[in-house]
Image (tube, rainbow, N blue to C red):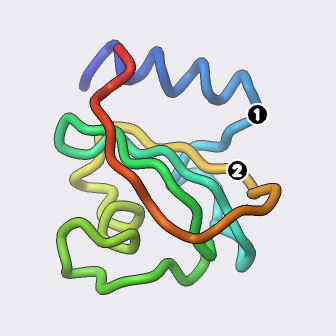
Amino acid sequence: MDYKATQWRKAMERKGWKLLGKYRLPNELIEFHVIHKGRLYSGRCMGASPIGDFSQPGSIAYVIMRRDLMTEGVWRKARGGQIGMNVRDLPY
């Protein structure tokens, strides 16, 4: 368990984000942040049916649904915007 990642997730939860895996994803547009293999994946997708193949590394579905490979992940209902994803270095 990565202590800094847990601190980051808890700070996001205090801002209104929900823990991936604890809450069921709605069938509407969501925003997400996932720490996966030491990188921060952020984007928007349809929560209950994310785009991409669950077995295709790097796809939105793979990053969101492979909870065994993620360090931490949060989501919230999106306030609009386009579906897509980007990858960044960790903020800490």
* Foreground residue among 88 and 55: 88
The amino acid type, in three-letter code, at marker 1 is Gly
Q: Which residue in the protein does label 2 denote? A: 76
The residue at 49%/44% (across/down) is 33
Q: Residues within 10 Å of mark 1 (few under 14, many from 20)?
A: few
Picture disc at residue 16: 1
**Left or right side of 1 for 85:** right
**Left or right side of 54 for 81:** right
Picture disc at residue 61: none
Instruction: Please state the horizontal and vertical placement of residue 32, each as a whole percent of the image.
Output: 55, 51
* SS at circle 2: strand
**Left or right side of 21 for 63:** left
Quarter of the image where one finds residue 15: top right
Do labels 2 and 1 touch, CB within 8 Å?
A: yes
Instruction: Please state the horizontal and vertical placement of residue 79, each as a whole percent of the image.
Output: 82, 56
Quarter of the image where one finds residue 24: bottom right
Which is nearer the N-term, disc 2 or disc 1? 1
Q: Residues within 10 Å of mark 2 (few under 14, many from 20)?
A: many
